[in-house]
Image: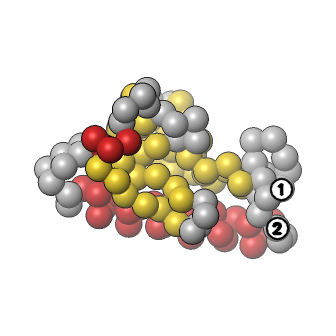
Amino acid sequence: MGEVWIRTINNGLVRADKITEIASTRGSLHEDQGFALKVIVDGKAHVVIDDGDLPGRLPERLEHAQHLEDALLFALDEAREADASTVVFFDPENDRWALAAAAELAGGLPAVG
C-alpha cells in the first residue's frame, strides 16, 4: 500500500496520515462569500478548496462545504486502498474529489508535512 497525499490550492502536497482535522470556514480567503476547506497538519492549516464564487446564503454554503468534507473522507479511504502512492485533489470543474497516482502529479510539486 502506498502513501496518500492531498494537493493544496498552492499545489503543495500534504501527507494524509498527518492530518489531525478537516475544517471549513465561512467565506473564502479573500471574500466573505463562499467557503474555504482546510486540512490541519501539525497545527498549521493547509487550504485545499477556496471557493469565493459559491452563491447562496451562509447555511447553504456551509452545507455544501460539509458535503465536500464528507466526500474528502471517502476519497481518502479509497486512496488508502490503492497499491501505489496516491494524490487526492479537488476537481473544481466537476465539483468533486479525484485521485491520481502520485508519480503522475509529483513532478515539481513541493511536499509539505
Residue 67 in sight in this render: yes
x, y percentage for residue 85? 24, 45
Q: Residue at x 42, y 28 (%)?
A: 108
How far from the left and from the top, in percent, is residue 113? Answer: 39, 29
Q: Amino acid at mark 1?
A: Gln
- Label placed on residue 33: 1
Q: Pointer 2: what residue?
A: 55
Marks counted in the figure total 2
Amino acid under label 2? Pro
* Mark 1 touches mark 2? (CB < 8 Å): yes
Residue 10 percent across, percent down from the top left? 58, 35
Q: Residues within 10 Å of mark 2 (few under 14, many from 20)?
A: few
SS at mark 2? loop
Q: Helix, strand, or loop for circle 1?
A: loop
Nearest to N terminus: mark 1 or mark 2: 1
User: With respect to residue 3, does 82 lie above or below?
Assistant: below
Which residue does the image show at 83% across and 71% down from the upper left?
Answer: 56
Q: Is residue 112 visible?
A: no
Does residue 56 sit above or below 99 in this rendering? below
Identify the residue at image location x=75%, y=73%: 60
Within 10 Å of disc 1 (Cα), the crowding (few <14, some 14-19, many 20+) is some
Comparing 106 with 62, the one in front is 106
Residue 73 sits above or below residue 56 on the image? above
